[in-house]
Image (cartoon, grey):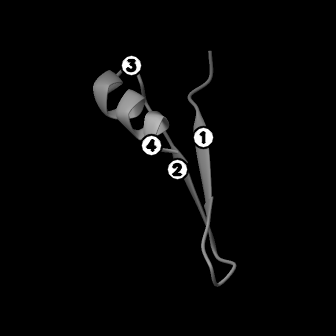
């Protein structure tokens, strides 16, 4: 299964993409996903 990729679009139109690694940091990934 591929790692989830989160895309955040800023107010000025810039885009930030972040790849999450649940096998390395499962708690952090779960917390991050629950906030978006």
Position above or below: 13 against 6: below
Q: CA distance from mark 3 to mark 4?
A: 19 Å
The residue singled out by tag 1 in the image is 5
The residue singled out by tag 4 in the image is 35
Quarter assignment of residue 13: bottom right
| 10 Å crowding of disc 1: few (<14), some (14-19), many (20+) | few
> Which secondary structure lies at badge 2?
strand
- Answer left or right for 12 relative to 20: right
Of all residues, the one furthest to the top in this rendering is 1
Earlier in the chain: of badge 2 and badge 3, it is 2
Q: How many marks?
A: 4
Earlier in the chain: of badge 2 and badge 1, it is 1
Say which of 33 and 2 sits in front: 33
Q: Residue at x 52, y 45 (%)?
A: 36
Of all residues, the one furthest to the bottom in this rendering is 12
Q: CA distance from mark 2 to mark 1?
A: 6 Å
- Answer left or right for 31 relative to 6: left
The residue singled out by tag 3 in the image is 23
The residue singled out by tag 2 in the image is 18
Position above or below: 33 against 13: above
Q: CA distance from mark 2 to mark 4?
A: 14 Å
Earlier in the chain: of badge 2 and badge 4, it is 2
The image quadrant where one finds the N terminus is top right
Q: Residue at x 60, y 40 (%)?
A: 5
Q: Residue at x 31, y 33 (%)?
A: 28
Q: For the residues labelled 2 and 1, say whether their Cβ atoms are less than 8 Å apart.
A: yes
Can you tell which of label 3 and label 4 is closer to the viewer? 4
């Amino acid at each position: 299964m591929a790692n989830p990729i989160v895309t955040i679009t800023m107010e000025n139109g810039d885009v930030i993409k972040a790849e999450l690694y649940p096998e390395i940091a499962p708690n952090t990934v779960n917390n991050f996903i629950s906030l978006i």
